[in-house]
Amino acid sequence: MTIYYGMAQWQHPAWVNWLYAASLSAGDRIGRYSQVFSTVEVGSTFYTKVDDTQLLRWYNSVGEGFKFSFKAPQTVTHRLLERPWLDVQQDWVAFMLSLQPLQNKLGPTMLQFPAICDERALDAILALCDMWTLSTPLSVEVRNLAYFDKAHIEPRFLAGLSDRHVNRVVMDSRPVFSTEAYCESLVDAQKKKPRVPCHPVATASHPVVRFIGHPDLPRNELWLDQWAAKLSQWLSEGLTPSVFVHSSDNIAAPTLAAQLDKKVRLLTPNYQSALLLPQSQEQASFW
């Protein structure tokens, strides 16, 4: 029984003297991060082509059990409908080739499609899934509301993913939209995060959850309880979830992950977690 917990980044100014010592260089922080968390979202590959040397440097900085979840380039996903299909295919193949040397440490790679990709994009999305050649999991996140219509497009979408053993990314942004934006981080989160229904459906063996927590930590209890129950169920079914925990400013994301994992442990007697946050600056300094 394994849950891969991770953040949307492996370093944050607020995590200094907690997850890693202040004396640790920025380049070494991923190694310290990987001693606490077992996975990470890597968004840099969405924005630009990351040099192969850099990819291998990250690969060599973490242990064998760690998993990277790289995001596919925006030229493949966010420009899907505007670019020639051949160009999209070429970029997708090139990205897969860049990941081949990293397969031993790959979690679910993410195809993340924007709200502009409506039902017209479904065939192309599934065609990209058909092109996946790596032995590691693939996941798909959609943000157009057509894909959440249980009476129309969603059944076709889910069946298409299931037939291809591709995981749906379940976005849960309910916490950050549960109150008015009374602080800067909530204003920013409500502008940037998609407000889509949360449909916790597993279409393959490595379901992916992206949980966007509220900065007022007690407000997250209801949703954490729901996710603990769902994760416990998935574990009992033999699935291996990846859970990426965000918060509106990401400062409290590690704490939310630990709280969620504690709830899973209480519900799942045979589950043994490896997630243990350092409690203080003194503990961090021992690293």
Image (cartoon, rainbow, N blue to C red):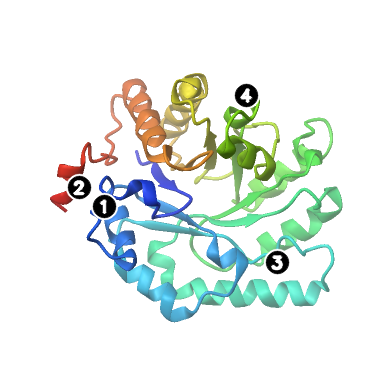
Is 121 on the left-hand or right-hand side of 89?
Answer: right
Against 251, is 181 above or below? above
Residue type pointed to by label 3:
Val
Spot occupied by residue 233 in the image (x, y as percentages of width and height): 46, 27
Q: Whole-Å distance between the Cαs marked 3 and 4?
A: 32 Å
Looking at the rendered structure, the kind of residue marked 1 is Tyr
| Residue 207, image x, y percentages | 53, 43
In depth, the one of 237 and 180 nearer the eye is 180
Marks 3 and 2, how far apart at CA: 40 Å
Residue pointed to by mark 3: 76
Q: Measure the C-alpha gap from mark 1 to mark 2.
A: 6 Å
Question: Where is mark 4, residue-wise?
Answer: 178
Left or right, residue 245 beside residue 281: right
| Pointer 3 local density, CA inside 10 Å: few below 14, some 14–19, many at least 20 | many
The residue nearer to you, when weighing 267 against 62, is 62
185 over 37 or under it: above or below? above
First of labels 3, 1 by sequence position:
1
For the residue labelled by badge 2, is the local secondary structure a helix, a strand or a loop?
helix
- Label 3: which secondary element: loop
**Sequence order check: which comes first, mark 1 or mark 4?**
1
What whole-number distance in Å separates the C-alpha atoms at marks 3 and 1? 35 Å
Quarter-of-image position of residue 46: bottom right
Residue 34 appears anywhere in the view: no
Q: Which residue is mark 1?
A: 20
Tag 3–tag 1 contact (CB < 8 Å):
no
Which disc number belongs to residue 284?
Answer: 2
Where is residue 138 shown, x and y percent of the image? 56, 56
Do residues under tags 1 and 4 come within 8 Å of each other at their CB atoms? no
- N-terminal label among 3 and 4: 3
Q: Are marks 1 and 2 in contact (CB under 8 Å)?
A: yes
Q: Nearer the viewer, mark 3 or mark 1?
A: 1
